[in-house]
Amino acid sequence: MSKKIKELSEAELDYACSPVPEDGRTSHFSLTMAWWSCCSAMFYVVVAATLAMGYGTVNTLIGIGLSVVTYAAINMVISRYAIRTGSSVSLFSRILFGRTGSALATLIFAATAIYYAVFEGSVIAMAANFFQPGLSYKTAALIVVVVSVPLVFGSVQHWLDKFNGVLLPVYLLGLATCVGLAINEYGYSNAWLTSVPQGGAPAMGWWHVYVAYMGVWILMMFCFDYARFGKKSDERYHALFNFGAPFYIAAFLLSGVAGIFLVNTIPIDGALSEVSAVKAIIIMMGGFGLLFVWVTQTRINTANYYLASVNLEALGKQAFGIKLSKYFWAVVVGCIVYVLMLVDVFSYLLQALAYQGVFVVAWVAIALAYMLNEADDEHPAEASKNDGDYPNYNSRGLIAWFGAVIVGIVMMNIPAVASFSSPCSAISGFALYRMLGFSEKTVPGAAMSIIGKGEIE
């Protein structure tokens, strides 16, 4: 790393408003430790267990397997593009939607990261309150936020990699211990492998599971903003391993199998929820259980807080022309998270995720349409332009994005086709962007400025 880069502040090393230069990249091991913080959320444990209760174990495992393949294939394309250009979601979205249009993508990304920070933080606070009833939930929530904000003051290169690298063994040991204690306490039976809901597994259950995991396509955006720190010499490693199938096998399949097994082994009063699963873990493991929950949630919350902060920093410049450091925005994120943690976040989780998921799925599809269609040698030059080189709005991208979102939301509110809303939103976004690009190349003159890359003031 050059002397110039070493002299930069931690906030500047995030390159929120500019592509990551070659001498700003980090080693493959360092980036792996930082990125794999995203694989250890209790959310993955509980969502798999919940889906298995509704669709059966076999259907759930098939849906997870298909999701692993899909995520790996898409992120292979995204990670390679991010590494080659050093671009972020915010910077890349200028190509698709124009200067002002990209601000919406940045806002959605930041808001979603904040929402997940609220969710994961609430789990830690509820676990602490359950373990120590004398500690009120409000106080526990405040402690969680106060501890979480400083954790993202460092950069991917200089802190998040080391912090999450240390916690990774604790997470793996905790998960193994949890499963081991459940077997020791309640015994082992293969019944969990063939478990089905009362009345039998519904038809096409695997499809419903697969679509449910599309609701977490925000990880594609997470991948984008982390992969940009990878060295070009490590592109193959990152595309195939770090951001590829091994990561999603750990995040979805490993955590999912553990969740399905635990819910079929440990008696849990009431309906399954993130709260009841956490309570079961603490009952079995005591103080180590609380430590395990803190580690799983804190690891992924470093990603949530970090991405929310740098994207708000980019949004401030895009929308308002102000340049404030990541430190300021991290504190803002912490304040927002604390206020929202005092609301019953679990009651509106699925509905909120469903609507934001449509926007994210459509964005991913349009990003793929661009990356797969444009020549590789054009990518670095296109991604590194100054703001003034982009139109205010790119009608091609915006028409494709909002068209796909409308398709998804309409279908989501029609019960007979609701399970096809996300896939159809993705297909619509991809197809519209490609079709409008074809029109741009075939329609001459003034029509090009309307259909294609024309600026709308």
Image (tube, rainbow, N blue to C red):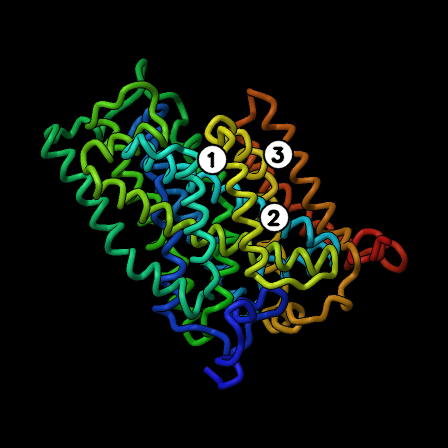
Tell me whether the residue at label 1 lies in contact with that at label 3, contact meaning CB atoms closer than 8 angstroms: no
| Disc sitting over residue 408 in the figure | 3
Instruction: Give the percent coordinates (x, y) of residue 43.
Output: 38, 39
Q: Is residue 192 left or right of residue 2?
A: left
Q: Is residue 224 left or right of residue 317?
A: left
Name the residue that disc number 1 marks. 211
Q: In the structure shown, which secondary structural element does the residue marked by tag 3 occupy? A: helix
| Disc sitting over residue 373 in the figure | none
Instruction: Give the percent coordinates (x, y) of residue 271.
Output: 34, 20
Q: In the structure shown, which secondary structural element does the residue marked by tag 2 occupy? A: helix
Residue 302 appearing in the image:
yes
| Disc sitting over residue 363 in the figure | 2
Kindly identify the amino acid type of the residue bearing the numbered disc 2: Trp
Instruction: Give the percent coordinates (x, y) of residue 432.
Output: 68, 46
Kindly identify the amino acid type of the residue bearing the numbered disc 1: Val
Mark closest to the chain's N terminus, 1 or 3: 1
What residue appears at the point 38 percent right and 21 percent down from the top-left corner?
202
Give the CA distance from mark 1 to mark 2. 16 Å
Quarter the N terminus occupies? bottom left
Q: Residues within 10 Å of mark 3 (few under 14, many from 20)?
A: many
Give the CA distance from mark 1 to mark 3. 12 Å
